Amino acid sequence: MTDFEPKIVAFLCNWCSYAGADLAGTSRMEYPSNVTIIRVPCSGRMNPIFVLKCLMNGSDGVLISGCHTGDCHYSEGNFYARRRFAVLKSFLGYLGIDPRRFQMSWVSASEGDKWAKLIHELVAEIKEAGPNKMGKE
Amino acid sequence: MKIGVFVCHCGTNISATVDVEEAAAAIGKLQNVKLSVTYRYMCSAPGQELIKKAVREESLDRIVIASCSPALHEKTFRKCAEEAGINPYLIEIANIREHCSWVHKEKKEATRKAIELVKIAVAKVARNKPLKKTYVPIEKKVLIIGGGISGVQSAIDISFAKYPAVIVEREPSIGGKMAQFDKTFPTLDCAACILTPKMVTVSQNKYVTIHTYSEIESVTGHVGDFTVKIRKKARSVDLDKCTGCGACFAKCPVKVDSEFDMRLGKRKAIYVPFPQAVPNVPVIDREHCLWFQKQTCGACKKICPFGAINYEMPDEIIEEKFGAIIVATGFTQFDHSVYGEYGYGKYKDVITGLHFERMANSSGPTGGRIIRPSDGKEAQDVVFIQCVGSRDEQKGVPYCSRVCCMYTAKHALLLKEHNKDAQAYVFYIDIRAAGKNYEEFVKKVQDEYGAIYLRGRVSRIFEKKGKLIVRGADTLSGSQIEIKADLVVLATGLIAQGDAVELAQMLHIPYDQNKLFTEAHPKLAPAETITSGIFLTGACQSPKDIPDTVATASAASVKALGLLIQGELEREPLIAKVNTDLCSGCKACVIACPFRAIEMKEIEDKKLKRKRNAAQVIEGVCTGCGNCTAVCRMAAIDLEGFSDKQIMGEIEAL
Amino acid sequence: MRYAYYPGCSLHSTAKEYDLSAKEVARSLGIELMEIPDWICCGATPAHITMNLLSIALPVKNLLKAKSMGSYEVVACCAACFNRLKVANAFMETRDEDRRKVEDIVGEPYRGEVKVRHFLDVLANQFGLKNLKEKVARQLTGLKVACYYGCLLTRPKDITGFDDLEEPHLMDDMMKAIGVEPVNWPYKTECCGASFSLSRTDIVLRLSRDILQMASDEGAQAIVVACPLCQSNLDLRQGMVNKKYNTNFNIPILYFTQVLGLALGIEAKKLGFEKHIVSPLSLLKECSRRLNVGYIPTKREP
């Protein structure tokens, strides 16, 4: 259990969160390497199927990160995402998935430090949730 | 399929923590990867040559570059691919620098993650489709939000190229904060003397339209095609009829504190903010005008020889199209009433830098006399406190406002020129005099004008027997000092305007934690935003002095002109597309689209042999956000560049 | 109104008059102050400059004792005790890691659930200034005082949550309500030298002199305080100040509870005036002469 290194996928919106993660890199902030980033144009692009596929394929955690309220580069995409994924999160238990494995965050392009801090906390939380048994049979 | 993978060392930026050779070797083993090599600087000319040569020799048809963030070089490599003969949209970039080598120290882990990131990119590019850029016409007109020195300079530059510019200024006159200054550092040029010729130039220029006393209501559209609603607030004075004779405000019986004079003097309810105002047409302050408040008086209307007064004038909303927008909204002063140690804004003789400017100005409220606002006596002992609000993480803003050291030195000089027996004391943390002739200026103020510079903070100001007792530290001599001052001038910091966030959200431009608008790149693109077609100049991006403001104004103008000159604008083809065979016509996408870029069109259904409605994307308007794709129940609409197949491919490759 | 009462070490010894007058005022207003049984020292300055955990554990121990009395708020009169109790509460509410260490020391879990108030806050805000005004039985008009808050009552703002940081006014408001004139002076929160009283008396003398001088310049006849150390530095050391700086201050340093007690009609002799070094008796004699009401301690009250 102590050697468990979770595999986490993060879907980042291009304009805010992806740029925020870039800034964390430019600022050389160190954070755990458990998170692999996939770029999407907007958090509103995200389909719940993507999240479920990741989890069913064996990812231990999934994160979607978008722009702060009111700042979405495409006006409203993040509002749709917030609502859509609040619903998904409430179903995860019903599907037999630990709800801790799916999280949403709002990171702006200037919040490199917040991104790094977020990863530290996320990895710690997924470690507590333990390995995802799905997709490993 | 023959995918070529090119892993960049980026000098040692990547190769220091990621074993690029190992990564390239691992990727080379993947299906469809024909070639997997590394190079020191992929973005350089030889690096790009390497790619082109490989494409030729290995007949590659898709490319993956493992390098820095796509934010930096996606365009570079698209162009390179095109030159190599591959469709520019058949490339993908794996970010193994900002998201990997720069944030992980352990080599084994960093390499493993880098390999995974490249794997994903390979899986995605295998599903990319060749795309063609679209072209939209550009509206050849520039909107400039803000009519201060930065907005005025932008207008001058745009109009010089014979393109039309429209300035929308919130106050009744253009000129901004610079119009309030007395003299400017380090030349001691009179601010009005160097500003007003520019103001007159734009007002007389046939290419420039100025809307004063106006605000931006809404902005829709995109680069090349912005639709902007402008609210022209009711001036109550007809701009065409008024000649600026001044009879109206001479007669007006109502006196109100003048905002332009920082409430040190008065103006009338119908007023022109300052004598050199452009336009030189008064405005009625409806909240203080007797006609609007109590339906009495009406003196101005009676006396106006040209019938220019119109009490019934309503606000007017006009709509215009623009190809580019320059944001020049400037700054406002930090409110020092949060500092209880300086009196919470209650002491009349504790003032700000702008108050001092108005006093020093010979056409200001005190006729150029530097006095104590409490009793009107000439100020002899004046204490200047730098960094009020700036460099204060607890109660103010964390950044340095850049100009305060200089304007405080200037004030110390002006004080001595106005009151020859005066003594200036300046409390500072550091002296930042980095511009041309700035250091020499500060030294002159210390040597020739006798200003005493004290390195330390002020802990308290209190009143005793009509004087202000300023208690502070002098760290260079290691003692506590108390100065009996007549006047205290606080160098309050430059902060973002109160409605900066509202404007940023209207324009869809990002802003930082200090509400300053974010530039596209802090070093290489300070005058643009990440939003195509919207440019930044002046203090709304970061506090700066007049030379830098004018420089960024010209920079933003050049960027805007660069767009307009092209006639047609290339649009990225990463937009949504509908497969009408699958579309059920439910309109979920039409509702979800934030830009109303999807409309219903009648199509001929070949199978059912009748007409039905299906969704269609309006190419020029779609911005490629993908919200439609996420809501479509039929998977009929998909987003090029980030299609369902591409994202699924990335997920499966994990 | 019932409270758990934490007097602290000073109020049982060098600041006995504060304890006496506070209890008299409470009795007169129908406020019950139940002294916490077996309370211990709060640690004050010596604890927090030597060992952080000790400085939190000591107040927490007291707060736990208060908790065992029932669900009462704790009232303190001493500014340092008040401040340390509040700091301990803030620490236990927010510092998750360190809280466990303190809980290990005191042997019980605690999360800052026992609320702490200063007596000034209780009287001015909970009892209410308007109600105080109605209870005034003795007119003290003509008495001009400087209200001195010192350091610990209002700082740090996030901990004490009590009155304005730079320009506090609760004591001034209370004085006005009971008919005493508070002077407007700028040294309300200036440091008196605090616990340097023994180790660096020269600093205390200098700072106290400045305070006494400013109060005197602004026309105050007495200084009103809410802290035993402020009182002791300004009162006990006044003679030494006079000697060192060749001044002739004769400014009584009164606790606000003593002044309030007088206004409420409590017998002067019950308020501990004889314990002061700079005697307030002549000032009180003068006030009483002016107003034709006798309240010299030796006389019997009507």
Image (tube, rainbow, N blue to C red):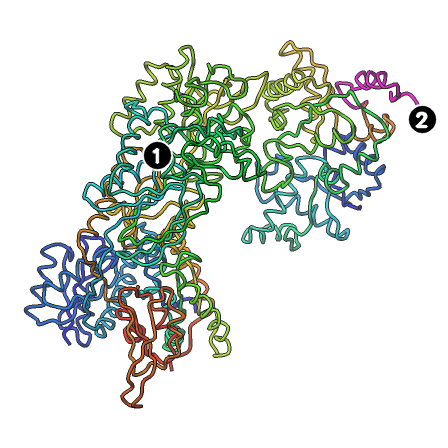
Residue B167 locus on image (x, y percent): 32, 43
Residue B284: tell me if it is visible. yes
Give the labeled residue for mark 1. B278
Give the image quarter of residue B40.
Answer: bottom left
Membership of C275 in magenta stretch = yes
Answer with left or right where residue C22 lies relative to residue B354: right
Give the image quarter of residue A9.
Answer: bottom left
Give the labeled residue for mark 2. C302
Which residue occupies the foreground of this view, C35 or B311? B311
Which residue occupies the foreground of this view, C153 or B268? B268
Q: Are marks 1 and 2 in contact (CB under 8 Å)?
A: no
**Residue at the extreme bottom:** B608
What residue type is disc 2 on? Answer: Pro
Looking at the rendered image, the quarter that the C terminus of chain B falls into is bottom left
Q: Which residue occupies 10% across, 55% down?
A: B45
Distance between the alpha carbons at the discs numbered 1 and 2: 79 Å
Write the start and end of the magenta stretch as one range: C274-302
Answer with left or right where residue B327 lies relative to residue A86: left
Query: Is label 2 in a helix, a strand or a loop?
Result: loop
Residue A104 locus on image (x, y percent): 43, 64
Residue B342: tell me if it is visible. no
Q: Which chain does the residue under circle 1 lie in?
A: B
**Residue at the extreme left:** B57
Q: Which residue occupies 50% across, 73% down?
A: A90
